[in-house]
């Protein structure tokens, strides 16, 4: 097997995400048991519980009714997904200011590969401390961070010392770190697998790591071999930057069909603003800019330009889109809808200069 050079991975995760955001929004909730979730009379469950509420045995996914039995003075708050989404985008943008190698796992957690940032003066731990401080200063929220040589160990580490934790697993100490933990801590080991393992006397990750490959394969197949590797702290999976959308676009139908260049340029600018802001949030740049146009008779077509150098800002997108619009304008042509899109997305740091520029006319589909 080929081995990658030693890597330095951070796993960052908000503490009591929804509940902490609510405490930040309403400081009278600070220091109090807060539960975010559905109403008990509607069979609601707890989505997130503040650490004060956890002191009373309240947990995520618990029926709200049970939570209120355990902690009758808990303060119940309805979820505000728009707000959590916004905070999520903000934290991902803080992460991406540190490195473009960010893999979000959910709204409130991400892996960062900081291997290339580590120097003699600044260790991965220093970077993790800086990250925690930045999140606290900018967002007024705490994250817990795990630092390790692989994703799976970093993820387990971030959970060890919550809230506001920082757990560093030095290279070479992965096995010792994992050994005393229960098998459910390993990625992919759910209640069913852990039950089967415990019947065979395997309770801890250490127990698992001492089983032979043959035994693991005979009892759990390929997954068994993977579990064994993880139990030894062996995980070469890469931080995957963007498994998200391949393009970003925004479009709008005009209130009335228009041939007015000013109104059309204005719309292109507003749409470019939305697309550009999205790119900036995500720390990516676009190699192509597309303009989608629909005429009054519903004929729809797109123009696209592959740029000499990729753009990542609203202005850059608008400039390219406006250039595409110019040759389409005529007094006889009334437009019904305009769309602006960005494709060929790459992380800002990996942007390559393209030596050719081309304009293509494509009929139909718009990503
Ligand atoms: P988690 O990271 O699992 O939980 P948490 O951030 O509330 O607490 P901590 O990490 O400190 O243990 O999930 C992140 C958010 O996802 C959580 O705030 C609410 C939401 N969520 C649900 O809506 N339902 C659930 O069952 C879980 C587990 C989380
Ligand atoms: Ca969390």
Image: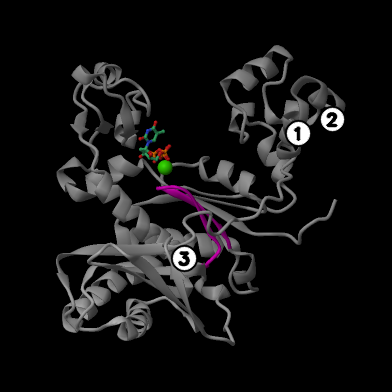
Ligand 1 lies under 8 Å from the Cβ of mark 2: no
Q: Position of residue 70 (x, y in %)?
A: 28, 18
Residue 95 in the figure: left or right of residue 326: right
The residue where tag 3 is placed is: 96
Contact (CB < 8 A) between labels 1 and 2?
yes
Q: Is residue 260 above or below residue 240?
A: below
User: Which of the 4 image quadrants contains residue 22?
Assistant: top left
Mark 1 to mark 3: distance in Å?
33 Å
* Residue at horizontal 59 percent and vertical 87 percent from the top: 355
Q: Position of residue 31 (x, y in %)?
A: 24, 40
User: Mark 3: which secondary structure?
Assistant: helix
Q: Position of residue 74 (x, y in %)?
A: 21, 28
User: Which of the 4 image quadrants contains residue 134?
Assistant: bottom left
Residue 124 in the figure: left or right of residue 205: left
* Residue at horizontal 57 percent and vertical 74 percent from the top: 350
Q: Is residue 52 above or below residue 14?
A: above
Magenta extent = 99-113
């Amino acid at each position: 097997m080929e081995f990658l050079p030693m890597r330095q991975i951070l796993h960052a995760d908000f503490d009591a995400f929804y509940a902490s955001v609510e405490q930040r929004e309403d400081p009278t909730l600070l220091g109090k048991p807060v539960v975010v979730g559905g109403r008990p009379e509607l069979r609601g469950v707890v989505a997130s519980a503040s650490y004060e509420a956890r002191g009373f045995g309240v947990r995520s996914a618990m029926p709200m009714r049970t939570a209120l039995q355990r902690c009758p003075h808990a303060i119940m708050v309805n979820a505000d997904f728009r707000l959590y989404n916004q905070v999520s985008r903000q934290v991902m943008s803080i992460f991406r200011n540190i490195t473009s190698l960010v893999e979000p796992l959910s709204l409130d957690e991400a892996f960062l590969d900081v291997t290339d940032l580590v120097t003699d003066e600044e260790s991965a731990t220093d970077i993790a401390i800086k990250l925690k401080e930045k999140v606290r200063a900018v967002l007024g929220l705490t994250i817990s961070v795990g630092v390790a040589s692989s994703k799976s160990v970093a993820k387990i580490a971030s959970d060890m010392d919550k809230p506001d934790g920082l757990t560093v697993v030095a290279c070479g100490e992965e096995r010792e770190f994992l050994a005393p933990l229960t098998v459910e801590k390993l990625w992919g080991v759910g209640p069913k697998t852990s039950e089967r393992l415990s019947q065979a006397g395997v309770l801890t990750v250490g127990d698992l790591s001492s089983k032979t490959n043959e035994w693991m394969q005979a009892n759990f197949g390929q997954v068994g071999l993977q579990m064994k590797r993880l139990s030894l702290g062996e995980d070469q999976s890469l931080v995957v930057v963007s498994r998200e959308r391949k393009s970003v676009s925004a479009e709008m139908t005009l209130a009335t069909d228009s041939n007015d260049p000013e109104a059309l340029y204005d719309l292109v600018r507003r749409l470019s603003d939305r697309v550009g802001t999205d790119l900036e949030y995500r720390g990516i740049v676009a190699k192509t800019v597309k303009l989608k146009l629909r005429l009054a008779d519903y004929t729809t077509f797109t123009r696209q330009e592959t740029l000499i150098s990729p753009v990542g800002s609203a202005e850059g997108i608008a400039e390219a889109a406006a250039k595409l619009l110019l040759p389409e304008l005529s007094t006889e042509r009334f437009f019904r809808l305009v769309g602006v899109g960005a494709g060929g997305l790459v992380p800002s740091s990996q942007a390559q200069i393209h030596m050719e520029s081309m304009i293509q006319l494509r009929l139909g589909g718009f990503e």
